[in-house]
Image: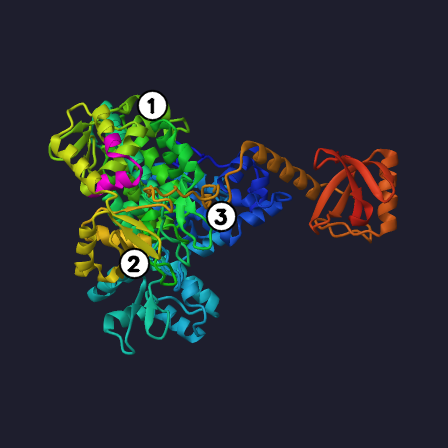
Amino acid sequence: MPEPSTAAGAPESGTGASSPRSLAEALRARDDAALSALLHSRPDLLNPVPGDVTQLATRAGTRASVVRALERLDRFTLQTAEALAVAPDPCPYPVLEGLLTGGEDERARAALPGALGTLRDQALVWGDEDRLRLVRTARELLAPSAQRPSPTGLGPTVAEATAGMSPTRVQEIVAAAGLPATHDPVSAVTALTALFTDPERMSALLDEAPAEAHQVLGRLVWGPPYGEVTPNPAPPVRWLRDRGLLLPATARTVVLPREVALHLRGGLAHRDTSPVAPPVTVHREHRPQLVDANAAGQALAALATVEELVKSWEHTGPPVLRAGGLSVRDLKRAAAVLDATEASTAFWIELAYAAGLLASDGEADERYAPTPAFDDWRELPPAERWSALVAAWLPATRTAGLVGEQDAKGRTLSVLGPELDRSAAPEVRRRVLELLADLPEGGSPDTEAVLARLAWERPVRTTSDLRARLAGWALTEAEVLGVTGRGALSGPGRALLEHRDPAPLLAPLLPEPVDHVLLQADLTAVAPGPLRRPLGDTLAVLADVESKGGATVYRFTPGSVRRALDAGHAAADLHAFLNEHSRTPVPQPLAYLIDDVARRHGHLRVGAASSYLRCDDDAMLGEILADKRSAALGLRRLAPTVLAARAEPTALLEGLRAMGYAPAAESGTGDVLVARADAHRTPARSAPVPVPDGPPVPDATLLGAAVRAIRAGDMAATAVRKEPGPASAVPGELPRTSAAETLATVQAAALTGSAVWIGYVNADGAASQRVIAPVRVEGGFVTGYDHTADEVRTYALHRVTGVAELADDHL
């Protein structure tokens, strides 16, 4: 990166060396490290690997690549590029400095060499400091136009605004401005431009303007530079228009020329520059131990939430919509199960999906269900389970915050549905955590400061608020996951960011699972911590969760006790279970509840007739027949102790339970049928792959190979050849020789041990230039040492377009 000079504040110029005449020459002058850095920062240039530096320069100037490069500039570097887009081409460094600093902004003056160095590194700017050039595509993208206003607020130049204007009208403007007439419109426009860029003459001209004219200019000077006029404009506007200080853009609009605006601005391209990144400072301080403890509590709650969600889908999961995803009704049901908001529930569902814990089962009646990986995940220690979740969260591109919004076609985005991927999400998520990591341990920032910093680092993408929303979601998600605690980055979160396993840091912070509960007289049980798995699974069947937190409260109800009896537990088993795992005596109301439900459980028996109802107490059957609520079940008496029903067994069971009875299903042999559904699992499913934001960043091995290939191709393209004969190509193009000449030349080179330059077209039709030293020519192939590839290779002669001898002193 260039350093400011002590004399003029400009980077040291490359005196003694000629200025590069093209971007390719500038890239060719870079060393391998600089070329590798360019390919690392702009990986799209590697697809495919350029054949030489000229191809690299061409690709670096394509619109798609330049747009991507501009998107990754910070605000001041982008402002520097915008200033170059409105500056003369080429632009001397002092002129650029004046556009950005006005000669007074010392912070901008100090930051300019770094910004210019970044633009050079990104191959967006080339040339020495006295001839700075912005890549043509970047200039086209950033220069002002009527269709695409510039962030500078500047308009077109005088030459651009007068293009197409009649010569007579141009001469009228020149005369009104007090300039002598010229012989042609080009010299007239040049004279007018010279007037507007001369501070003294412009000041004298503006001193003659009416006061109202200054007000008109004041409204346009910082942009937008266009204004509407009537067919008969007011005198101040007419005065400005007559002298070219306002020029016609359309029949009803005028534009303030760039040169006039720059004079009025004092030479500044931007009203405000942002040479320094907004600081992210500590807003609140907490003890690091308190942060970690709070994060550990959130992590434990996250594990319980994900497990509860996925388990609730293991028997009858929600169906998959025809267009993919989860219906709004099923999202509401899942939110009721978790006792959470729909937005929060959408995040937990997407997180479980990203971690590979749930997926669609792929059956005809497609439903979502846990994957086999969920069972493996449940067996892991809590810290490792949490590590698996956050490892899936950090790089995920699926964005739960978008659920409920509409896509470009007006379709509502659903949980687990398509169109939720946002490739910028992982980068924003990681950058938010990096900003938190830069603060002292225990320090939490102000959210607005984080958003301001992100907007400065990537200003191009702030045309929509998606990046800010992604950052807000990242902060919220990190907190509920336990990556942060009280807004500060936790110890495990810091390890996650540094690509270390966070589980060893989290494990000591989590409480040990307990093997007991505290039974209360109000038919509740308090779990003083996370329960061990067998205890927790059984208690989840026997009781309903009433409240969550550090201590979970379970409530026993007739329905929950009946659920346990339906699952095959006998009353004696339940009493023994509670006595074994309660640190307090079993309250009498709870014992009575279990015995009462057990006494009535199975007194009625439901089987398939379509279904039937059997009971030893014929009076109870008579009572059911007399009840009007049983009419929909289609009951009729078959025997004193048996009723037949039109309803299916499941519907009959549900109907009787709704009437307040506790029936039990029975098998074909008359035994009580345990109504415990088998847990449903999908076939093995892999977690969804994040959608990358452009090509992947190349590793050192690929970069090294690419640089060698580019250098080798460049050597072939710039090889010094002997004077071309009549059959040879123009220098710089692939050689063209006949098959006989090609064969004779390579045979002669093999005999003399000299190198030749060949053009070659491979099987895919890709043409390249090679410098080879032939050692054997036979069977229609030439084998030799390829200087461009630095290895021995064999080429088919029929694919050689031509051959040329190298100058004697080239190799």
Q: Nearer the viewer, residue 59 or 268?
A: 59
Q: Counting residues from the N terminus, which is met first, the one under dot 1 or under dot 3?
A: 3
Give the residue furthest to the top: 508
Please indicate, yes or no, whether residue 806 appears anywhere in the rendered image. no
- Give the residue number, with chain letter if any, for mark 2: 645
The residue that appears at 31% across and 39% down in the rendered structure is 567
- Give the residue number, with chain letter if any, for mark 3: 133
Give the residues drawn in magenta, as a range.
Answer: 559-574
Q: Quadrant of residue 9?
A: top left
**Residue type highlighted by circle 3:** Arg
Neighbours of disc 1 within 10 Å: few (<14), some (14-19), many (20+): some
Cβ atoms under marks 1 and 3 closer than 8 Å = no
Query: How far apart are the two marked residues, 1 and 2, measured between alpha carbons?
Result: 61 Å
Please indicate, yes or no, whether residue 561 appears anywhere in the rendered image. yes
Query: How far apart are the two marked residues, 1 and 3, measured between alpha carbons?
Result: 52 Å
Q: Counting residues from the N terminus, which is met first, the one under dot 3 or under dot 2?
A: 3
Nearest-to-viewer mark from 1 and 3: 1
Q: Nearer the viewer, residue 484 or 346?
A: 346
**Residue type highlighted by circle 1:** Leu
